[in-house]
Amino acid sequence: QVQLVESGGGLVQAGGFLRLSCAASGTIFRINDMGWYRQAPGKQRELVARITRDGMTTYVDPVKGRFTISRDNAKKTLFLQMNSLKTEDTAVYYCNAAIITRPTVPGEATYWGQGTQVTVSS
């Protein structure tokens, strides 16, 4: 089975920073696109940033210039550096990955981590 485990969440004051990590393990042949999503209380889960296997990145407007997504393919790990945090960033952050488990099976499947809480106080 494939498992994604996030870490690095916590409580910080506005203007502070956090670095989230997501480690993938299990039966993995190749990890394609990966991304970070978040869900605030009473809101829908939304995309924050995504990154291709080759390192092409995409960010939603609210986090542009403040967040940086990156990955280490050798370590099967995804990162999210969050700077200049705002109270609006408070949410549970989830790691997402498109993974091919075996080369003999066509297609890929989407996996999610359990989430890590990020709370930004004013």
Image (cartoon, grey):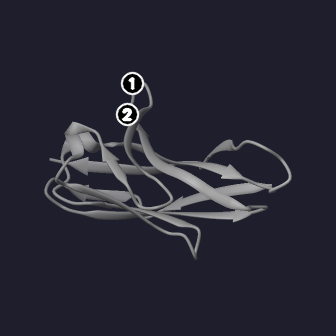
- Amino acid under label 1? Lys
Secondary structure found at label 2: loop
Q: Quadrant of the N terminus?
A: bottom right
Tell whether label 1 touches label 2 (CB within 8 Å).
Answer: yes
Q: Which mark is residue 58?
A: none
Percent across and percent down for residue 26 are 76, 63
Q: Amino acid at mark 2?
A: Ala
**Left or right side of 72 for 74:** right
User: Which secondary structure lies at badge 1?
Assistant: loop
| Residue 103 image offset from top left, x and y in percent | 80, 56
Distance, label 2 to label 1, CA atoms, is 5 Å
| Residue 53: percent from left, percent from top | 51, 59
Which of the labelled discs sits on residue 43, or is there none?
1
Frontmost residue, 98 versus 1: 98
Above or below: residue 7 compared with residue 96? below
Residue 48 placement, left or right of 62: right
Residue furthest to the right in view is 104
Count of numbered tags = 2
Question: Which residue bears the numbered disc 2?
Answer: 40
Residue at 60% of width from left, 59% of height from top? 5
State whether residue 1 is above or below residue 92: below
Neighbour tally class for label 1: few under 14, some 14-19, many 20 plus, Cα within 10 Å:
few
